[in-house]
Image (cartoon, rainbow, N blue to C red):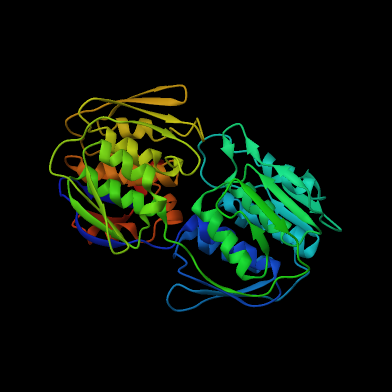
């Protein structure tokens, strides 16, 4: 087990490159199950979740090989494999994205119920509803989803839920529909850039999809898909994390490779808070010389403010000059980082799906524990400005979604290092 130590007080300055989007890479890697031909996926980040996905694909009979320049080549070796076991699937929620491709191509699937970050109930009912509407027979048996479909048939499916569209649910149903007989219409489809990137990859394989990037997808099924090459889009969540890190330290940071059109809700909040934001030459720059204004933020499906940046924004607003309110409309229980932020001196009160943040003048370093991936980034960001040293435990969450983040923050001037956790710290890791 490891920990990260951050000594706060240094403004971040310089340029950092954004990696490929984790949330686009994972379903796209799963989509290679849909073809017997080789695929080459470029700009894949080197993350624990990607490694877990590769392990699952190998269990499912796919030959996966890492290439130079962040590329992964994938080709089918055993078309009869159809079981994604618990020991791999439990590590991340996106593993559920193997279900649709397995049903469409191999007619049966046995996939363990997914794991990943724990911050409240995240049901997969919309996945199952959509695949059942296509003709799949699905049951839960001993912790596994067992599904069969002699033939998937296109139909009209509404995928809206109580908290908006399902991103992975849309991915699963869209992938399955590419090989279904007839036409599938997905209403209330997720519009996130990662879903659009999956759609672009599927079209390059020969899928017939209209409406990519809109709430209405029309998919005409084809008999087979070919292999393809594809480059993953930049990670907007990672880019937003670096922008917030630069902002909270009152620094001057350029995030190179980020797409401003994917981050308009985030940059708008930062501008309201008094930051200067500019975009040029495929990069976004944030800089500040003064204090921060309080801002009210509500997480919403894309193009709204992303739930995956809620925790990081909370750390930033904890130093604003006044009271801010963050309302979580995607995962109302996603506030496990509040108690740990309070250990650094942040003043936050949770009321239902909202957090009321009373800005303080300073934060102080403290030992803190990460509860999930984005909470880890939140605590690192707080540590960048806290007086003294902040020690972040359970950083294996960070490695699921941020590639070598301590090295990249160090390149911007942060005083940060990774160390093994001592035996007497085991209680922090349980």
Is residue 100 depicted above or below 189 in this figure? Answer: below
- The x, y position of residue 156, in whole percent, is 75, 45
Please tell me which residue is depicted at 39% across the width and 52% down the height of the picture: 261
Query: What is the number of callouts on the image?
Result: 0
Q: Is residue 383 visible to us here?
A: yes
Residue sitting at 57 percent across and 63 percent down?
Answer: 200
Quadrant in the rendering for residue 129:
top right
Decide which of 154, 55 is in the foreground and name it: 154
The answer, for residue 407, to whether it is visible in the render is: no
Specify whether 58 is left or right of 412.
Answer: right
Residue for point 65% across, 51% down: 217
Outermost residue, top direction? Answer: 351
Position in image of residue 336 (x %, y %): 43, 34
Horizontal arrangement in the rendering, residue 129 relative to residue 57 (left or right): right
Is the N terminus in the top left, top right, bottom left or bottom right quadrant?
bottom left
Residue at the farthest left position = 289
Q: In terms of depth relative to the viewer, which is nearer, 252 or 86?
A: 252
> Relative to residue 341, is residue 59 depicted above or below?
below
Left or right for 87, reference 400: right
Residue 186 percent across, percent down from the top left: 68, 47
Image location of residue 384, percent across then percent down: 23, 46
Q: Residue extending furthest front?
A: 210
Q: Quadrant of residue 348?
A: top left
Residue at 43% across, 32% down? 335
């Amino acid at each position: 087990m490891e920990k990260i130590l951050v000594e706060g007080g240094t403004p971040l300055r310089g340029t950092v490159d954004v990696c490929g989007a984790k949330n686009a890479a994972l379903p796209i890697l799963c989509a290679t199950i849909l073809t017997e031909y080789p695929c080459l996926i470029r700009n894949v980040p080197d993350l624990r979740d990607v490694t877990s996905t590769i392990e699952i694909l190998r269990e499912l009979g796919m030959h996966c090989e890492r290439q130079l320049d962040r590329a992964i080549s994938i080709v089918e070796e055993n078309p009869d494999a159809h079981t994604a076991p618990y020991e791999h699937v439990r590590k991340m929620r996106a593993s559920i994205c193997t279900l649709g491709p397995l049903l469409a191509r191999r007619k049966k699937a046995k996939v363990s119920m997914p794991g990943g970050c724990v911050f409240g109930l995240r049901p997969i009912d919309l996945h199952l509803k959509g695949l059942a509407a296509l003709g799949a027979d699905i049951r839960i048996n001993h912790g596994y989803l067992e599904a069969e479909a002699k033939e998937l048939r296109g139909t009209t499916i509404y995928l809206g839920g109580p908290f908006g569209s399902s991103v992975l649910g849309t991915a699963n149903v869209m992938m399955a529909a590419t090989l279904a007989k007839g036409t599938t219409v997905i209403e209330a489809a997720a519009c996130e850039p990662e879903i659009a990137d999956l759609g672009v990859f599927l079209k390059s394989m020969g899928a017939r999809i209209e409406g990519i990037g809109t709430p209405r997808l029309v998919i005409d099924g084809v008999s087979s898909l070919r292999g393809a090459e594809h480059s993953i889009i930049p990670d907007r969540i990672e880019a937003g994390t670096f922008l917030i890190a630069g902002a909270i330290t009152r620094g001057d940071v350029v995030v190179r490779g980020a797409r401003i059109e994917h981050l308009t809700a985030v940059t708008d909040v930062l501008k309201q808070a008094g930051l200067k934001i500019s975009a040029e030459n495929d990069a976004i720059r944030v800089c500040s010389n003064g204090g921060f204004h309080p801002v009210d933020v509500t997480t919403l499906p894309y193009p709204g403010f992303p739930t995956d940046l809620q925790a990081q924004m909370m750390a930033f607003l904890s130093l604003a000059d006044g009271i801010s309110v963050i309302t979580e409309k995607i995962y109302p229980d996603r506030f496990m980082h509040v108690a740990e932020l309070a250990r650094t001196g942040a003043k936050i009160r949770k009321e239902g799906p909202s957090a009321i943040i009373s800005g303080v003048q300073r934060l102080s370093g403290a030992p803190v524990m990460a509860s999930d991936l984005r909470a880890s980034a939140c605590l690192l960001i707080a540590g960048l400005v806290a007086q003294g040293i902040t020690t972040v435990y359970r950083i294996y969450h960070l490695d699921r979604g941020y590639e070598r983040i301590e090295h990249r923050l160090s390149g911007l001037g942060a005083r940060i290092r990774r160390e093994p956790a001592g035996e007497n710290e085991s209680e922090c890791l349980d």
